[in-house]
Image (tube, helix red, strand yellow):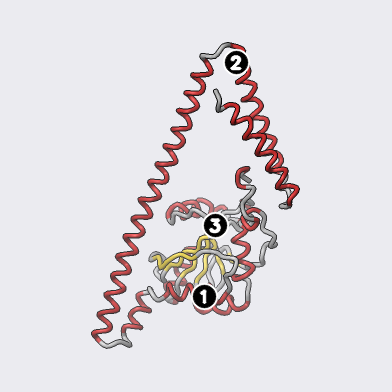
Protein backbone atom coordinates (compact mmCIF):
# COMPACT_ATOMS: atom_id res chain seq x y z
CA UNK A 1 0.00 0.00 0.00
CA UNK A 2 1.38 3.40 -0.91
CA UNK A 3 1.27 5.81 1.98
CA UNK A 4 -0.06 8.81 0.06
CA UNK A 5 -3.02 6.85 -1.32
CA UNK A 6 -4.53 5.80 1.99
CA UNK A 7 -7.18 8.49 1.74
CA UNK A 8 -8.50 7.32 -1.65
CA UNK A 9 -12.05 5.92 -1.89
CA UNK A 10 -12.69 2.75 0.06
CA UNK A 11 -13.41 0.63 -3.01
CA UNK A 12 -9.89 1.21 -4.30
CA UNK A 13 -8.18 0.24 -1.06
CA UNK A 14 -10.11 -2.46 0.73
CA UNK A 15 -12.41 -4.73 -1.24
CA UNK A 16 -15.14 -5.65 1.17
CA UNK A 17 -16.41 -8.18 -1.33
CA UNK A 18 -15.01 -11.65 -0.84
CA UNK A 19 -13.44 -13.23 -3.94
CA UNK A 20 -16.25 -14.23 -6.25
CA UNK A 21 -16.41 -17.80 -7.47
CA UNK A 22 -15.51 -17.20 -11.09
CA UNK A 23 -14.68 -20.51 -12.72
CA UNK A 24 -11.87 -20.67 -15.25
CA UNK A 25 -9.70 -23.17 -17.09
CA UNK A 26 -5.93 -22.98 -17.22
CA UNK A 27 -5.82 -24.92 -20.50
CA UNK A 28 -8.22 -25.21 -23.41
CA UNK A 29 -11.16 -22.95 -24.18
CA UNK A 30 -14.93 -23.23 -23.99
CA UNK A 31 -17.40 -20.58 -25.18
CA UNK A 32 -18.61 -18.45 -22.28
CA UNK A 33 -16.09 -19.80 -19.75
CA UNK A 34 -12.97 -17.98 -18.62
CA UNK A 35 -9.64 -19.51 -19.56
CA UNK A 36 -6.01 -18.49 -19.15
CA UNK A 37 -5.16 -20.20 -22.43
CA UNK A 38 -5.14 -17.36 -24.97
CA UNK A 39 -3.89 -19.58 -27.80
CA UNK A 40 -6.80 -22.00 -27.33
CA UNK A 41 -9.26 -19.09 -27.09
CA UNK A 42 -7.98 -17.67 -30.37
CA UNK A 43 -8.37 -21.04 -32.07
CA UNK A 44 -11.90 -21.41 -30.70
CA UNK A 45 -12.80 -17.88 -31.82
CA UNK A 46 -11.52 -18.52 -35.34
CA UNK A 47 -13.43 -21.79 -35.62
CA UNK A 48 -16.74 -20.41 -34.31
CA UNK A 49 -16.44 -16.78 -35.44
CA UNK A 50 -16.65 -15.58 -31.83
CA UNK A 51 -15.23 -12.32 -30.48
CA UNK A 52 -12.84 -12.53 -27.51
CA UNK A 53 -13.04 -10.67 -24.21
CA UNK A 54 -9.65 -10.19 -22.52
CA UNK A 55 -9.82 -9.40 -18.79
CA UNK A 56 -6.59 -7.86 -17.49
CA UNK A 57 -7.14 -8.43 -13.77
CA UNK A 58 -5.55 -8.40 -10.32
CA UNK A 59 -7.84 -11.10 -9.05
CA UNK A 60 -6.72 -11.31 -5.42
CA UNK A 61 -6.19 -7.62 -4.64
CA UNK A 62 -8.07 -5.39 -7.10
CA UNK A 63 -11.29 -4.07 -5.57
CA UNK A 64 -12.89 -3.10 -8.90
CA UNK A 65 -12.03 -6.54 -10.35
CA UNK A 66 -13.88 -8.20 -7.47
CA UNK A 67 -16.84 -5.85 -7.90
CA UNK A 68 -17.11 -6.84 -11.59
CA UNK A 69 -16.86 -10.52 -10.68
CA UNK A 70 -19.57 -10.19 -8.07
CA UNK A 71 -21.96 -7.94 -10.00
CA UNK A 72 -21.47 -9.23 -13.54
CA UNK A 73 -19.37 -12.32 -14.23
CA UNK A 74 -20.82 -14.65 -11.60
CA UNK A 75 -24.43 -13.81 -12.44
CA UNK A 76 -26.58 -16.39 -14.28
CA UNK A 77 -27.72 -13.79 -16.82
CA UNK A 78 -24.13 -13.13 -17.85
CA UNK A 79 -23.25 -16.81 -18.06
CA UNK A 80 -26.27 -17.50 -20.27
CA UNK A 81 -25.28 -14.68 -22.63
CA UNK A 82 -21.57 -15.47 -22.75
CA UNK A 83 -22.00 -19.17 -23.56
CA UNK A 84 -23.17 -18.47 -27.07
CA UNK A 85 -21.40 -15.23 -27.82
CA UNK A 86 -17.87 -15.01 -26.41
CA UNK A 87 -14.47 -16.47 -25.87
CA UNK A 88 -13.17 -15.14 -22.55
CA UNK A 89 -9.55 -14.93 -21.41
CA UNK A 90 -8.36 -14.09 -17.89
CA UNK A 91 -4.95 -12.41 -17.88
CA UNK A 92 -4.15 -12.25 -14.19
CA UNK A 93 -1.57 -10.20 -12.27
CA UNK A 94 -2.17 -11.32 -8.67
CA UNK A 95 -0.10 -10.79 -5.56
CA UNK A 96 -0.23 -14.54 -4.93
CA UNK A 97 2.02 -15.68 -7.77
CA UNK A 98 0.86 -19.29 -7.42
CA UNK A 99 -2.49 -18.30 -8.96
CA UNK A 100 -0.94 -18.06 -12.44
CA UNK A 101 0.80 -21.09 -14.03
CA UNK A 102 4.48 -20.42 -14.63
CA UNK A 103 4.08 -20.87 -18.38
CA UNK A 104 1.81 -17.80 -18.53
CA UNK A 105 3.78 -15.38 -16.33
CA UNK A 106 6.14 -13.96 -18.97
CA UNK A 107 3.41 -14.07 -21.62
CA UNK A 108 1.14 -11.99 -19.39
CA UNK A 109 3.89 -9.44 -18.83
CA UNK A 110 4.39 -9.16 -22.58
CA UNK A 111 0.65 -8.75 -23.20
CA UNK A 112 0.40 -6.05 -20.55
CA UNK A 113 3.08 -4.12 -22.40
CA UNK A 114 1.66 -4.89 -25.86
CA UNK A 115 -1.78 -3.56 -24.95
CA UNK A 116 -0.48 -0.67 -22.85
CA UNK A 117 -2.42 -1.70 -19.75
CA UNK A 118 -2.22 0.98 -17.07
CA UNK A 119 -4.88 -0.18 -14.59
CA UNK A 120 -7.07 -3.09 -13.54
CA UNK A 121 -9.43 -4.30 -14.61
CA UNK A 122 -9.09 -3.42 -18.27
CA UNK A 123 -11.35 -5.25 -20.71
CA UNK A 124 -10.06 -5.52 -24.27
CA UNK A 125 -12.46 -6.83 -26.92
CA UNK A 126 -11.00 -8.58 -29.98
CA UNK A 127 -12.61 -9.83 -33.15
CA UNK A 128 -12.61 -13.52 -34.00
CA UNK A 129 -9.18 -13.24 -35.64
CA UNK A 130 -7.77 -12.77 -32.14
CA UNK A 131 -5.87 -9.67 -33.24
CA UNK A 132 -8.22 -6.88 -34.33
CA UNK A 133 -9.15 -4.73 -31.34
CA UNK A 134 -12.80 -3.66 -31.39
CA UNK A 135 -12.56 -1.52 -28.27
CA UNK A 136 -12.11 -1.42 -24.52
CA UNK A 137 -14.51 -1.40 -21.60
CA UNK A 138 -14.14 -0.26 -18.00
CA UNK A 139 -15.38 -1.44 -14.64
CA UNK A 140 -18.06 0.30 -12.62
CA UNK A 141 -20.02 -0.18 -9.43
CA UNK A 142 -23.32 0.12 -11.32
CA UNK A 143 -22.44 -2.40 -14.04
CA UNK A 144 -24.84 -5.30 -14.51
CA UNK A 145 -24.80 -8.30 -16.85
CA UNK A 146 -27.31 -6.48 -19.04
CA UNK A 147 -25.42 -3.19 -19.16
CA UNK A 148 -22.09 -4.88 -19.85
CA UNK A 149 -23.72 -6.98 -22.57
CA UNK A 150 -25.09 -3.81 -24.17
CA UNK A 151 -21.61 -2.26 -24.18
CA UNK A 152 -20.21 -5.36 -25.85
CA UNK A 153 -22.95 -5.44 -28.46
CA UNK A 154 -22.17 -1.82 -29.33
CA UNK A 155 -18.56 -2.82 -30.04
CA UNK A 156 -19.66 -5.87 -32.02
CA UNK A 157 -21.31 -3.57 -34.56
CA UNK A 158 -17.77 -2.80 -35.74
CA UNK A 159 -17.03 -6.45 -36.60
CA UNK A 160 -16.61 -6.84 -40.39
CA UNK A 161 -18.97 -9.82 -40.44
CA UNK A 162 -21.66 -7.80 -38.64
CA UNK A 163 -21.10 -4.80 -40.92
CA UNK A 164 -21.45 -6.95 -44.03
CA UNK A 165 -24.60 -8.62 -42.75
CA UNK A 166 -26.11 -5.23 -41.98
CA UNK A 167 -25.08 -3.74 -45.32
CA UNK A 168 -26.75 -6.64 -47.08
CA UNK A 169 -30.09 -5.31 -45.79
CA UNK A 170 -29.51 -1.83 -47.32
CA UNK A 171 -29.96 -0.49 -50.81
CA UNK A 172 -26.84 0.52 -52.73
CA UNK A 173 -26.91 4.22 -51.81
CA UNK A 174 -27.41 3.59 -48.09
CA UNK A 175 -24.80 0.84 -48.15
CA UNK A 176 -22.25 3.26 -49.61
CA UNK A 177 -23.12 5.89 -47.01
CA UNK A 178 -22.85 3.47 -44.11
CA UNK A 179 -19.53 2.06 -45.29
CA UNK A 180 -18.23 5.60 -45.62
CA UNK A 181 -19.15 6.25 -41.99
CA UNK A 182 -17.39 3.05 -40.94
CA UNK A 183 -14.23 4.09 -42.78
CA UNK A 184 -14.33 7.57 -41.26
CA UNK A 185 -14.76 6.07 -37.80
CA UNK A 186 -11.77 3.77 -38.31
CA UNK A 187 -9.59 6.68 -39.46
CA UNK A 188 -10.64 8.83 -36.51
CA UNK A 189 -9.97 6.02 -34.06
CA UNK A 190 -6.51 5.51 -35.52
CA UNK A 191 -5.80 9.23 -35.12
CA UNK A 192 -7.07 9.11 -31.55
CA UNK A 193 -4.83 6.14 -30.75
CA UNK A 194 -1.80 7.94 -32.17
CA UNK A 195 -2.63 11.06 -30.16
CA UNK A 196 -2.97 8.99 -26.98
CA UNK A 197 0.40 7.37 -27.69
CA UNK A 198 2.01 10.79 -28.07
CA UNK A 199 0.31 11.96 -24.88
CA UNK A 200 1.65 8.92 -23.00
CA UNK A 201 5.15 9.66 -24.25
CA UNK A 202 4.77 13.27 -23.15
CA UNK A 203 3.64 12.16 -19.67
CA UNK A 204 6.64 9.85 -19.44
CA UNK A 205 9.00 12.66 -20.44
CA UNK A 206 7.33 15.03 -17.99
CA UNK A 207 7.80 12.45 -15.23
CA UNK A 208 11.49 12.13 -16.03
CA UNK A 209 11.92 15.90 -16.02
CA UNK A 210 10.12 16.10 -12.68
CA UNK A 211 12.56 13.59 -11.23
CA UNK A 212 15.47 15.55 -12.69
CA UNK A 213 14.14 18.74 -11.11
CA UNK A 214 13.89 17.01 -7.77
CA UNK A 215 17.44 15.71 -8.00
CA UNK A 216 18.79 19.15 -8.93
CA UNK A 217 16.91 20.76 -6.08
CA UNK A 218 18.37 18.18 -3.69
CA UNK A 219 21.89 18.85 -4.97
CA UNK A 220 21.37 22.60 -4.53
CA UNK A 221 20.14 21.99 -0.98
CA UNK A 222 23.17 19.87 -0.15
CA UNK A 223 25.44 22.56 -1.58
CA UNK A 224 23.85 25.26 0.58
CA UNK A 225 24.02 23.09 3.68
CA UNK A 226 27.72 22.39 3.05
CA UNK A 227 28.38 26.13 3.33
CA UNK A 228 26.76 26.40 6.76
CA UNK A 229 28.63 26.50 10.08
CA UNK A 230 29.05 23.12 11.72
CA UNK A 231 26.34 23.75 14.27
CA UNK A 232 23.75 24.53 11.59
CA UNK A 233 24.80 21.49 9.57
CA UNK A 234 24.22 19.31 12.62
CA UNK A 235 20.73 20.80 13.04
CA UNK A 236 19.99 20.03 9.38
CA UNK A 237 21.21 16.44 9.74
CA UNK A 238 19.03 16.03 12.82
CA UNK A 239 16.01 17.23 10.83
CA UNK A 240 16.77 14.73 8.07
CA UNK A 241 16.88 11.93 10.63
CA UNK A 242 13.62 13.20 12.12
CA UNK A 243 12.01 13.20 8.67
CA UNK A 244 13.09 9.62 7.94
CA UNK A 245 11.69 8.49 11.29
CA UNK A 246 8.38 10.31 10.74
CA UNK A 247 7.96 8.78 7.28
CA UNK A 248 8.82 5.32 8.59
CA UNK A 249 6.31 5.67 11.43
CA UNK A 250 3.63 6.62 8.91
CA UNK A 251 4.52 3.68 6.67
CA UNK A 252 4.58 1.19 9.56
CA UNK A 253 1.10 2.31 10.60
CA UNK A 254 -0.27 2.02 7.09
CA UNK A 255 1.12 -1.51 6.77
CA UNK A 256 -1.26 -2.56 9.55
CA UNK A 257 -4.11 -1.79 7.10
CA UNK A 258 -6.14 0.20 9.66
CA UNK A 259 -9.90 0.26 9.41
CA UNK A 260 -11.48 3.17 7.56
CA UNK A 261 -13.11 5.22 10.32
CA UNK A 262 -12.99 8.74 11.75
CA UNK A 263 -10.47 7.88 14.46
CA UNK A 264 -8.01 6.42 11.93
CA UNK A 265 -8.51 9.30 9.53
CA UNK A 266 -7.48 11.63 12.34
CA UNK A 267 -4.52 9.38 13.10
CA UNK A 268 -3.41 9.48 9.48
CA UNK A 269 -3.76 13.26 9.39
CA UNK A 270 -1.59 13.59 12.50
CA UNK A 271 1.10 11.36 10.99
CA UNK A 272 0.94 13.29 7.73
CA UNK A 273 1.17 16.61 9.55
CA UNK A 274 4.24 15.38 11.42
CA UNK A 275 5.97 14.61 8.12
CA UNK A 276 4.87 17.93 6.59
CA UNK A 277 6.11 19.96 9.56
CA UNK A 278 9.62 18.51 9.29
CA UNK A 279 9.63 18.93 5.50
CA UNK A 280 8.69 22.58 5.98
CA UNK A 281 11.61 23.12 8.38
CA UNK A 282 14.03 21.46 5.95
CA UNK A 283 12.73 23.66 3.11
CA UNK A 284 14.03 26.72 4.98
CA UNK A 285 17.63 25.71 4.28
Q: Is residue 96 above or below residue 156?
A: above
What residue appears at the point 59 percent right and 30 percent down from the top-left corner?
280
Residue 185, image x, y percentages: 32, 69
- Circles 2, 1 touching at the beta carbon (< 8 Å): no
Badge nearest the viewer, 3 or 2: 2
Distance of label 3 from label 1 (alpha carbons): 19 Å
Question: Percent x, y for residue 139?
Answer: 55, 64
Give the percent coordinates (x, y) of residue 18. 70, 62
Q: Measuring 60% from the left and 71% from the top, which residue is drawn there?
A: 72
From this view, report whether residue 246 is shown above or below residue 34: above
Residue 146 occupies quadrant: bottom right
Give the SS element for disc 2. Answer: helix
Report the residue marked by disc 2. 232
Give the secondary structure at mark 1. Answer: helix
Instruction: Name the quadrant of the C terminus.
Output: top right
**Between 123 and 237, the one nearer to me in the picture:** 237
Badge nearest the viewer, 2 or 1: 2
Amino acid sequence: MKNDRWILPLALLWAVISPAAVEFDTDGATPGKWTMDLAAARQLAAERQLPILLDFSGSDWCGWCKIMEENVFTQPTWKAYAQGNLGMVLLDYPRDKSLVPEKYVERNKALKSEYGIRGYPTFVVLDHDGQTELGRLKSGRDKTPESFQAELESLFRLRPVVIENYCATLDEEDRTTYRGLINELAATKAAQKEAEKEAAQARSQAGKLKRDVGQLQERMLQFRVAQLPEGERMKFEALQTQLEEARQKRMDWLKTEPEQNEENREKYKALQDEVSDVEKKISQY
